[in-house]
Amino acid sequence: MLFTPFTFPNGKTAKNRIFKSAMEEQLAQNDQPSEKLVRLYDTWAKGGAGMLVTGNVMVAESGKGSINDVVISDGRSLEMLKKWAKAGTQNDTLLIMQINHAGKQSPAVVNKTPLAPSAVPLVGMDGFINPPRELTADEINGLIQQFMQTDRIQTGVAFVDKKAGAMLEMNWYMTQMDLIGQGKQPNPKLSAWKVLLKTLWENGKAGLSTGRA
Ligand SMILES: Cc1cc2nc3c(=O)[nH]c(=O)nc-3n(C[C@H](O)[C@H](O)[C@H](O)COP(=O)(O)O)c2cc1C
């Protein structure tokens, strides 16, 4: 079973069931993918994994969850992205990039004031993570655009893919934005997973694919 292929509903196939989950590598250099990151994925792909999901790749500087996160907000790092994509897709490996925004989970060393859908602080993080400032509706819209833009960056190989994490973040913001648009307060207690499941269900019903070539 471990060495039999698995095809996802969007048609992508992993050659086996060996799956490396998203793990924040903290190997960026000046926010860009580094040679160390390329070497890591080169090793994993050569090692025979069927599917590799990258750690958080942030869509904006304001969304960093650690000081050495990769940030892709434009085409600046295209050359290194291509190298990373090439390393991680060799040996018929399925490579998925997780795109993300850390919201209120951005530590003080990165963000003096994290940005989040609501100004509700995380509990027990004093000194490590500062209380967030509530995003304006325009800022939420801007972040949604960043998610869309990052998704469109072309590396020449299938790489930037929509992963549940990105959909979760984006739909979380969209739900909060809807509430703000209706003149209501954002709802920080709304289960993010509920939002994700609702979105996946609706996408499925609409026949939309969550992947891209
Ligand atoms: C060091 C480390 C970094 C992680 N970074 C991420 C991340 O960037 N994005 C994410 O969605 N999950 C992240 N996770 C969560 C893992 O992807 C995984 O969901 C979690 O470890 C639960 O799986 P397990 O029960 O097999 O350990 C991280 C976990 C670890 C241990």
Image (cartoon, helix red, strand yellow):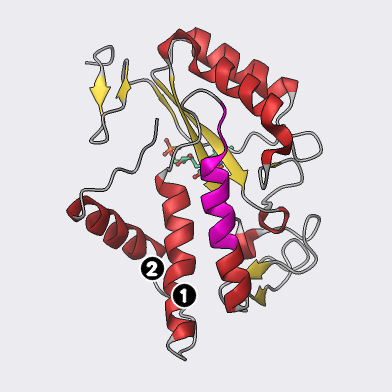
**Left or right side of 108 for 47:** left
Q: Position of residue 152 (x, y in %)?
A: 52, 42
Q: Position of residue 88 (x, y in %)?
A: 53, 19
**Left or right side of 179 for 40:** right
Whether label 1 lies within 8 Å of ligand 1 gets the answer: no
**Residue type pointed to by label 2:** Ser
- Which residues are the magenta region? 143-155
* Residue labelled with disc 1: 176
Residue nearest the viewer, comparing 118 with 7: 7
Q: Position of residue 213 (x, y in %)?
A: 40, 30
Q: Position of residue 39 (x, y in %)?
A: 66, 16
Does residue 121 sit above or below 37 in this rendering? below
Give the quadrant of residue 162: top left
Q: Secondary structure at mark 2?
A: loop
Check the image and name the residue furthest to the bottom.
183
**Residue type pointed to by label 1:** Gln
